[in-house]
Amino acid sequence: MPRIQLKLDGTAVDGWMADISTEFPDAEFRLLASQLRDEGALVILEVKTPKGDALVRRFESTPEVRSLEVIHSDERTVLIQFTTSATNSYDPLFRSKNISIYPTILRDGWFSVTLAASHERLSKYTDELAATGIPYRVLSLTQSYDSSELLTDRQWQVITQAVERGYYDTPRGCTVAELAESLDVHKSAASRLLHRAESRIVKEFVAEAAS
């Protein structure tokens, strides 16, 4: 599945939380979780700052913050949960039906966002950013895969058994015939399953290395 990492300027579209972060430029805002809703969002936010009390007061005085709870506070960190009205920074994520991989980092007005989704959904997100007028830059775009999606259950079983029995060791720990016997299948069936699984793995590896 494609994974994209990008930075976007939250201050360019009246992003109130981005604006607050510019008032605490040395602080690291870590969005640990959020639940997007039609009318806004519920957010859990951790901020690394020695100015926790001032930060909490700033959030309490912000009109967009509907409710606020301080979960933890010490000399270097404050953890808060709050509900907020919709913001332009959240809109592209909400409209493109994407979910950010947490934590999302906010520092001095800039969000660092990581998404993993189909090419279509990632493209929709960047289209929404452009439509909203949020400046952004792509840091990386990679292709990853889930082995459970790459191989069938039977292929995964055969490959796992082959590794465990030393089929890929030098010298080999077992033959195809011995592997087939342990799986209770014919030698030719085990050979076909191995070949198909190995072919998928190699093709995926080459495609990812070339991307």
Image: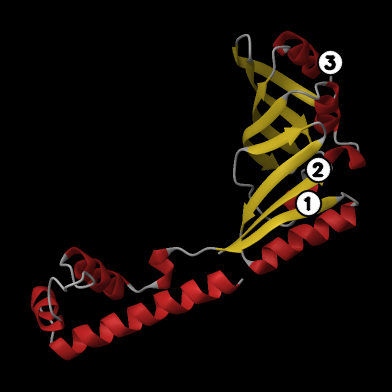
| Tag 1–tag 2 contact (CB < 8 Å) | yes
Instruction: Please name the residue shown 29% across and 75% down the image.
Output: 155
Q: Which of marks 3 and 1 is nearer the N terminus?
A: 3
Q: Which mark is residue 89?
A: 2
Three-letter residue code for mark 3: Ser
Q: What's the image's color scheme?
A: secondary structure
Classify 210 as above or below 34. Answer: below
Mark 1 surroundings within 10 Å by alpha-carbon count, few (fewer than 14), some (14 through 19), many (20 or more): many
- Residue extending furthest front? 171
Q: Where is residue 55 in the image (x, y as percent from the top left)?
A: 76, 15
| Tag 3–tag 1 contact (CB < 8 Å) | no
Three-letter residue code for mark 1: Pro
Q: Where is residue 83 in the image (x, y as percent from the top left)?
A: 71, 28
Three-letter residue code for mark 2: Ser
Say which element carries label 3. loop
Apparent side of residue 143 relative to residue 61 in the rendered image (left or right): left
